[in-house]
Amino acid sequence: MTFVVAEANVSAIKNHTATVNPANYAIDNGTISFTVEYLESLTVGEKNLTVVTDKGNVLLKIVVKETDQ
């Protein structure tokens, strides 16, 4: 999954109040890509991630659904 933050420097990503380990995502030219392992670690339900940037915070809402495997 990727998310674009144009023309802003990301200093952190928070999952509610917990800071997401930078090993769980990569930032390249304003595009944030989360690792599959991080996404699979999230429990089912709505997640509100906050992308902290030098231009202000951006709310990223992710809905994790149960899958049939």
Image (spheres, rainbow, N blue to C red):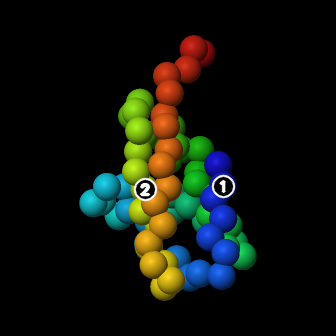
The image quarter in which residue 16 lies: bottom left
Residue 11 visible here: no
Query: Which of 61/24 is in front?
Result: 61
Q: Is residue 3 left or right of residue 59?
A: right
Picture residue at 37% right of the left edge, 55% below the top: 15
User: In this view, which residue lies farthest toward the left?
Assistant: 17
The residue tagged with tag 2: helix, strand or loop? strand
Q: How far is the residue under mark 1 from the one under mark 2?
A: 13 Å
Picture residue at 58% right of the left edge, 54% below the top: 34
Query: Which of 69/11 is in front?
Result: 11
Going by the numbered disc 1, the residue's amino acid type is Thr
For label 1, the residue is 2
The residue tagged with tag 1: helix, strand or loop? strand
Relative height, residue 21 to residue 30 (above, below): above
Going by the numbered disc 2, the residue's amino acid type is Leu
Picture residue at 67% right of the left edge, 75% below the top: 6
Q: Residues within 10 Å of mark 1 (few under 14, many from 20)?
A: few
The label on residue 12 is: none
Mark with earlier residue (1, 2):
1
Query: Which of 61/31 is in front?
Result: 61
For label 2, the residue is 49
Relative image position of residue 55 (x, y in whole percent):
50, 83
Relative image position of residue 47 (x, y in whole percent):
41, 45
Relative height, residue 62 to residue 45 (above, below): below
Relative height, residue 26 to residue 41 (above, below): below
Relative image position of residue 12 (x, y in whole percent):
44, 72
Relative height, residue 46 to residue 14 (above, below): above
Relative image position of residue 19 (x, y in whole percent):
35, 64
Residue 48 visible here: yes
Q: Is residue 18 left or right of residue 40?
A: left
Give the position of the C terminus as an image quadrant: top right
